[in-house]
Image: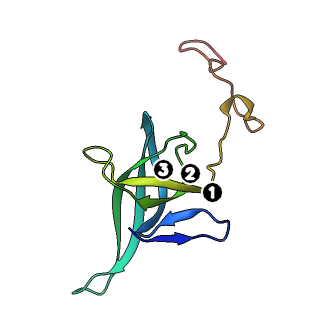
């Protein structure tokens, strides 16, 4: 297998690379990455979105759902895993629902009048 050298002197195996979004991290040391590509249909000439899911090995479990990651080709690690996480390109934005403020004039949960009562 050919080995290339990156600028920061880390050897990287030559092979395919793909960029996609992490859609699942429910397995131990495994992430599911969805790669989306847009291609022109050969007959109808319309742009079609094609999606493909890849199972990738994440040793340190650094990727979370929603992250944009780069995966590289790897030797088979299991029945479905043939890719490995190379880097997390962009972290997902996490919104904490406990700190979200409701807009003014919005009734709170449980404050609606009961049936039969005059409001």
Q: Secondary structure at mark 3?
A: strand
Residue 99 location (% of width, % of height): 74, 32
The disc placed on residue 22 is 3
Mark 2–mark 1 contact, CB under 8 Å? Answer: yes
- x and y percent of residue 89 in the render? 61, 59
Name the mark on residue 90.
Answer: 1
Looking at the picture, tell me which residue is in the foreground, 44 or 42: 42
Q: Mark 3 and 2 residues: CB-CB less than 8 Å, in contact?
A: yes
Dot 1 lies on which element? Answer: strand
At 33% from the left and 60% from the top, the residue drawn is 52
Q: Which of the two residues, 67 or 55, is positioned nearer the viewer here?
A: 55
Q: Which residue is mark 2?
A: 67
Q: Position of residue 34 (x, y in %)?
A: 41, 56
Which circle's residue, 3 or 1, is located before the other in the chain?
3
Query: Could you tell me which secondary element the residue under label 2 belongs to?
Result: loop
| Spatial separation of the CA atoms under disc 3 and disc 1 | 11 Å
Residues at marks 2 and 1, CA–CA distance in whole angstroms: 6 Å
Nearest to N terminus: mark 3 or mark 2: 3
What residue is rendered at 58% in x and 42% in y? Answer: 62
Task: Point out the tag, 2 or 1, that comes first from the N-terminus.
Answer: 2
In the picture, the disc for residue 57 is none
Quadrant location of residue 116?
Answer: top right
Give the CA separation, mark 3 to mark 2. 6 Å
Q: Quadrant of the C terminus?
A: top right
Q: Residue at x 35, y 79 (%)?
A: 39
Tell me the colour scheme of the image: rainbow
């Amino acid at each position: 297998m050919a080995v290339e050298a990156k600028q920061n002197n880390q050897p990287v195996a030559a092979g395919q690379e793909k960029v996609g979004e992490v859609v699942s991290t429910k397995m131990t040391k495994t992430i599911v990455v969805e790669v989306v590509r847009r291609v022109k249909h050969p007959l109808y000439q319309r742009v079609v979105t094609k999606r493909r899911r890849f199972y990738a090995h994440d040793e340190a479990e650094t990727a979370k759902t929603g992250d944009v990651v780069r995966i590289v080709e790897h030797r088979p690690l299991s029945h479905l895993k043939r890719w490995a996480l190379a880097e997390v390109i962009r972290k997902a934005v996490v919104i904490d629902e406990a700190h979200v403020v409701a807009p003014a004039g919005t009734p709170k949960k449980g404050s609606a009048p009961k049936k039969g009562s005059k409001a």
